[in-house]
Image (cartoon, helix red, strand yellow):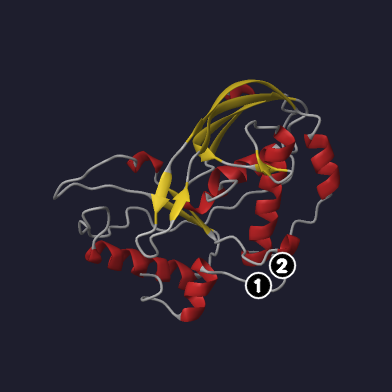
Amino acid sequence: MLREHSTAEIYQRIFEPSTDEGPSGFKNPPRPFAFRASHLDGQSFGAGDSFYFDLNLFDTRLESILAIQRAFEALGSAGLGPARGTAELQILEEPALVTFSLEEDGPEVRELRIDLVTPLELKARGEVTEDLDFQVLFSRIRDRISTLRSLYGSGPLEIDFRGMGLRAGEVRRTGGELERTRRERRSSRTGQVHGIGGLTGWCAYRGRLREFLPYLRVAEWCGVGRHCVWGKGQIRVNAGQEM
């Protein structure tokens, strides 16, 4: 629907971005959005019912916002879901610009808990990890934020990547419960099947955490790991007194 109801330039920028150069040598840059629709998993709706989902968009140009709105209006008219039920788009909340500072603020944070709202899948040293090492998690979050900012914002992060990574390695996991789930999604357009399973559960960490907390807050919006544009890798952070 986005292809049919926007220009080729906007479609490619949002849904099929590509570049010969870019951060970390990305040839297929991340798409500038993340769905938030896990609450709809397994739900059914009859005529007259309503449902909602969220879409976090990191390309904040007005033309991109309007193109996505037109695409969902057309999708509702054409039908969606296994039975292709039709729906009318009603925007309950106008698009709002949300900004975050990555600067440290407030007192030192020594403990935090991360809940995996949706399955998360990370790779470490080329292999899918079965653990949630803080250094690996933070490094993937940091790199994702920097890449999104490079492509759709004001440029890559100007930080000491190596130094922050080493300090993240000093944070220790102190508890948690993790298990691996297996799920799949099938593209109605291509017929391809994609694995959307991963780790679920929670982890607790202890260390000097204040400098990492702003990045974790941003990750609540942008997600982390494989297929996070489709809603995987959604996390919830509880730090200090919030725990």
Q: Amino acid at mark 2?
A: Gly
**Is 21 rendered above or below residue 172?**
below
Q: Position of residue 199 (x, y in %)?
A: 54, 34
> Which quadrant holds the C terminus?
top right
Residue 195 at x, y = what percent?
Answer: 48, 47
> Which of the two residues, 47 or 80, is positioned nearer the viewer here?
80
Q: Quadrant of residue 71?
A: bottom left
Query: What residue appears at the point 61 percent right and 26 percent down from the top-left corner?
Result: 203
- Quick check: marks 1 and 2 in contact, CB under 8 Å? yes
**For residue 28, above or below residue 48:** below
Residue at image coords 71%, 67%:
22
Q: Which residue is mark 1?
A: 19
Q: Nearer the viewer, residue 54 or 101?
A: 54
Residue sitting at x 40%, y 50%: 185
Q: Residues within 10 Å of mark 1 (few under 14, many from 20)?
A: few
Hey, what amino acid is under mark 1? Thr
> Where's residue 105, x and y in %?
72, 38
Image side of residue 220 versus residue 96, left or right: right
Q: Quadrant of the N terminus?
A: bottom left
Report the side of 125 relative to 199 (left or right): right
Q: Which mark is residue 22?
A: 2
Q: Label for residue 235?
A: none
